[in-house]
Amino acid sequence: MTALDARPRTGTMLRFPEAFRWGTATAAYQIEGAAGEDGRSPSIWDTFSRTPGKVRNGDTGDTAADHYHRVDEDVALMRSLGVTDYRFSLAWPRVQPTGRGPAARKGLDFYRRLTDRLREAGIRPVATLYHWDLPQELEDAGGWPERETAYRFADYAALAADALGDRVATWTTLNEPWCSAFLGYGSGVHAPGRTGEADALRAAHHLNLAHGLGVRALRAALPAGAEVSLTLNLHAVRPHTDTPQDRDAVRRIDAVGNRIFLDPVFRGSLPDDLVRDTADVTDWSFVKDGDCAAAAEPIDSLGLNYYSPAAVAARTTADDDAAPSGSPSPWAGAERHVRFVPLTGPRTAMDWPVDAAGLYELLLRLRDELPHVPLLITENGAAYEDYADPSGEVKDPERVAYLRAHLEAVHRAIGAGADVRGYFLWSLLDNFEWAYGYSKRFGIVHVDFPTQRRTPKSSARWYADVIARGALTD
Ligand code: IFM
């Protein structure tokens, strides 16, 4: 008997709204493989993963979950789960290999095939344009710290919408631009692996601009009624103690972690306190008149990715003496003033705390601050040490407990007035978990990478049951 089976049964049934969208999510570089096929060019992740020491075990996305060749099987898996929606990303270097000029026909054919299969299966395609795989040629020209990259993104958005606009229900411009900017150009733990606070802030601004220009390009090409969205990994940040100093630490992280995107996109301006906090890093002269207004092009929904919260305290000189960090920080302009305080309690295999209250807190904040913006949970899930037992089964009760707690939080937030329209579980398949390579498994379907055999875990059966009932039951 698992800990889960031992829960007292109360007969409770938490029903979700009738039209609630139940999905799974993936991203191109993490699952597709076929890195050198049909004209796809290298992206920054191909380069980064080939650079010794950047990705655990030297893993790359060359083969990944071989989804490029297994679309039929993977869509059939989703159909068997009963999902209503599937969130995937287009590989920019597959669709427009050099990041400029015409589309590659074979690249588009792949996404036509995928979306055809989805629609035949009655599953709504939800496409993200950018989930971190910048064509290497654009990085060689300066990458996201350069304004030009935003214009290149808008052209790519137009081209993708022209080709696939008749078959994709929801378009997301960017996935987690915070990671692209601050992990890619700040701490350097993600591709392209550059480390510079000013470049990270420039990248964040150009990602906001790219988003707004991308929305305009999508609207111009898409049929009326197409849904256009953006996905942010908003940070649920709490003060370590209820002192003004620790509350100010929260303000700083909120500025550079959340409001740096929320304010341009929904208010058309940069947060004043962020500009002040980062004055010794940059003068923000790369922000041109009209940029933030362009970023605020109206969208139809906001995607929220949530995994775990964080607690912060004001940094003192004693902290610096005790633990000089040395490695570059992703928190441009903030980490000299802020220290992250480890949370206690259960953790996932990523060493991330399990704390569904953080999701509830964020949803209520969005309810209050953006009352007219429908919300989608575009990612939520957990990595655990999964393995197939001798009978071939993969039992993952910790993941089921994690998912249940987070869905309960979503249900509670809906009850409190948050306009949450759907939930996309990360992830459908075990996949390439960026700098962790294949060492972390987020899938509800186990992938044996040497054979590419797919085995639904017990969480997949559990999720299928939730979807079939439209409810969480004991
Ligand atoms: O795997 C990633 C995904 O690509 C973006 N959001 C977080 C996931 C887990 O780290």
Image (cartoon, rainbow, N blue to C red):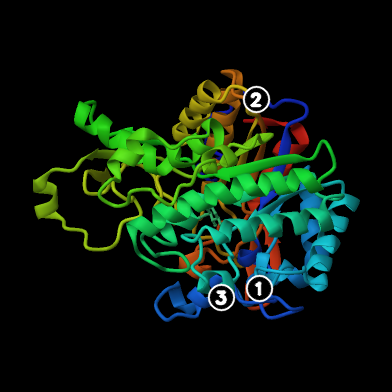
Identified by mark 1, the residue type is Thr
Q: Which mark sits nearer the N-terminus, 2 or 1?
A: 2
Along the line of sight, the residue nearer the viewer: 81 or 101: 101
Residue sitting at 49 percent across and 45 percent down? 307
The label number, if any, that marks residue 98 in the structure image: 1
Element on which disc 2 rests: strand
Q: Which residue is mark 3?
A: 46
Q: Reply above or below: 29 against 3.
A: below
Q: Would residue 391 be visible to someone looking at this image?
A: no
Question: In this figure, which residue is indicated by the disc labeled 2?
Answer: 14
Reply above or below: 429 against 319.
Answer: below
Whichever of callouts 3 and 1 sits on the residue coming sooner in the sequence is 3
Residue 246, percent from left and from top: 23, 33
Please state if 230 lies on the left or on the right of 284 as rendered.
right
Residue 163 in the image, given as x and y percentages of width and height: 83, 58
Question: Would you call the spot at circle 1 few (<14 residues within 10 Å), some (14-19), or many (20 or more)?
Answer: many
Q: Position of residue 45 (x, y in %)?
A: 54, 70
Residue 238 seen anywhere in this rendered image of the structure? yes
Figure check: 447 above or below 350: below
Furthest residue in direction top, as rendered: 416
